[in-house]
Image (cartoon, rainbow, N blue to C red):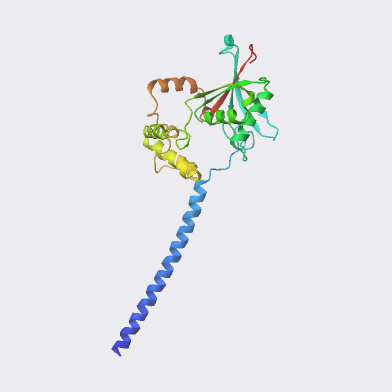
Amino acid sequence: MAFCNQGFVIMITEFECLLYLGNLKKVLLVFCMGFSAWAYRTALPPLPKMVGSPGGPSITSPRIKLRDGRHLSYIESGALVEELGVYFVAIDRPGYGESDPDPKRTVKSLAFDIEEVADHLNLGPKFYVAGYSMGGQVVWSCLKYIRHRLSGAVLIAPAVNYWWPHLPLNLTNEAFSRQLPQDQWSLRVAHYLPWLSYWWNTQKWFPSFSIIDGNHAILSPPDIEASSKLFGGMNRDQKSFIFFLSTIKLQI
């Protein structure tokens, strides 16, 4: 009897353990599903607010309506270089500043956007392009897809893909090692987990990209001085731009 009672106790204990483990698995499953849903929502950037729409940013810059109905904003200047006969145009890339986002944007489509803007502004059959920072990617796009329209191209401190196979490995490794640790991690996230880029650059748990964090430690004193003069009057979105250069007095 005692044996039976002991056996009965053991059976009840095993049942309770199985019940406990089953409930634990359910709790863990619900937790994982909830965490996955939260992570998914956090990783997605918010829907853009259309410029000029209710609740969206106001229009303060001239804009060009493209063939597909989108608008690209731009600023132009010729006074600073009037003696040289050069005309400058800077545009906001799609989704930046006051330019409408392009859900179908590709490297190729951006080059054709630039060509369309150049034609709208009557820059002539050929013009120069210059890209600063991420604008270097835009210049590369122009060189690849609208080379016949270019008189020349300029890269100004372009952003680098440290995993590009056509660059010398020892050179890219050395350049990567000179980046701030927080920038190294940001670049790794962008390369290996691009879908987490928005979350990484907006979260507050870890240091994100230094420029976004406002950390100018990577810049030299002359860089900081030049940047303050060049970008002092621009807002944050306008600092990502490319230049169009087209000669007025000399047709190339």
Check the image and report above or below for 67 versus 29. Answer: above
Is residue 37 visible in this depiction of the protein?
yes
| Image location (x, y in percent) of residue 76 | 60, 20
Total numbered badges shown on the rendered structure: 0
Q: Quadrant of residue 178?
A: top left
Is residue 202 visible in this depiction of the protein?
no
Judged left or right of residue 8, residue 33 is right
- Of residue 174 and residue 155, the one placed in the foreground of this image is 174
> The C terminus appears in which quarter of the rendering?
top right
Residue at image position (47%, 19%) is 229
Residue at image position (36%, 77%) is 14
| Image location (x, y in percent) of residue 158 | 48, 28
- Of residue 174 and residue 99, the one placed in the foreground of this image is 174
- Of residue 24 and residue 146, the one placed in the foreground of this image is 146
| Image location (x, y in percent) of residue 13 | 35, 77
Check the image and report above or below for 251 versus 11. Answer: above
Check the image and report above or below for 226 versus 164. Answer: above
Q: Quadrant of residue 3?
A: bottom left
| Image location (x, y in percent) of residue 106 | 60, 37
> The N terminus appears in which quarter of the rendering?
bottom left
Judged left or right of residue 53, residue 166 is left
Q: Residue furthest left?
A: 2
Q: Quadrant of residue 147?
A: top right
Q: Residue furthest bottom?
A: 1
Judged left or right of residue 215, residue 93 is right
